[in-house]
Amino acid sequence: MKTNQKNYLNYVLGFIFCLLVRMIPFRPPNIEPILAVQMPFSRIFGGLLGFSFGFFSIVVYDFLTFGLGIWTLITAMAYGLLGLWAIRYFKNKKNNSLEYVKFALMSTLFYDAVTGLTLGPLFFHQSFVVALAGQIPFTILHLFGNSIFAYVLSPRIYNLLKKKKIEIKPLNILATSKI
């Protein structure tokens, strides 16, 4: 099999993996690997497939769980835009966990602000204050999940697709600080 075909197979497997994780019953909300997989995929596959990964991750899940609605379009577009932003953000960045975590934090705040603070007030007649109050714990979970997945998965997925040796380094903040 050619390298390109292997990479596209990895793209499909990554998509299925994210979908299966999202289908786990009683999974805490927003603890899912979509962004962690989307970031290296955007770097490797480019704009169309980076956008499509995020967009269709939302659409297919909502379709399979009978949750299609106007929110599907808005959340899918927002996740797709994160794929496009990832291309620009990572253009001159090294493949390391810290860069993926930084992007995960910024993009999660963007995504949750765009989706969580607009959908309720615009489509469900929820007040902005109620939407904000409900969004805070939801965003904290989202930041936690995306950061952990970005730290652990993203650089390894990138290395796998680029066929580089995967080096696992423990996170040891204390060892780098001078006391």
Image: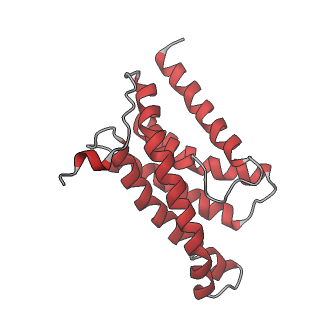
**Residue at the location (56% across, 80% down)?**
132
- Vertical comparison of 14 with 23: above or below: above
**Residue 28, percent from left and from top:** 67, 57
**Residue at the location (51% across, 58% down)?**
144
Q: Is residue 2 left or right of residue 75?
A: left
Taking depth in this image into account, of 118 and 105 the one nearest to the observer is 105
Residue placed furthest toward the top: 1
Residue placed furthest toward the left: 178
Q: Quadrant of the N terminus?
A: top right
Taking depth in this image into account, of 166 and 38 the one nearest to the observer is 166
**Residue at the location (23% across, 46% down)?**
176
Residue placed furthest toward the front: 179
Task: Identify the coloring.
Answer: secondary structure
Quarter holding residue 102: bottom left
Taking depth in this image into account, of 176 and 35 the one nearest to the observer is 176
Q: Say how many tags the image has.
A: 0
**Residue 172, percent from left and from top:** 33, 44
Quarter holding residue 68: bottom right
**Residue 112, percent from left and from top:** 53, 67
- Vertical comparison of 160 with 95: above or below: above
Residue placed furthest toward the right: 66
Q: Quadrant of the C terminus?
A: bottom left
Quarter holding residue 5: top right
**Residue 96, percent from left and from top:** 34, 40
- Vertical comparison of 165 with 168: above or below: above
**Residue at the location (52% across, 41% down)?**
37
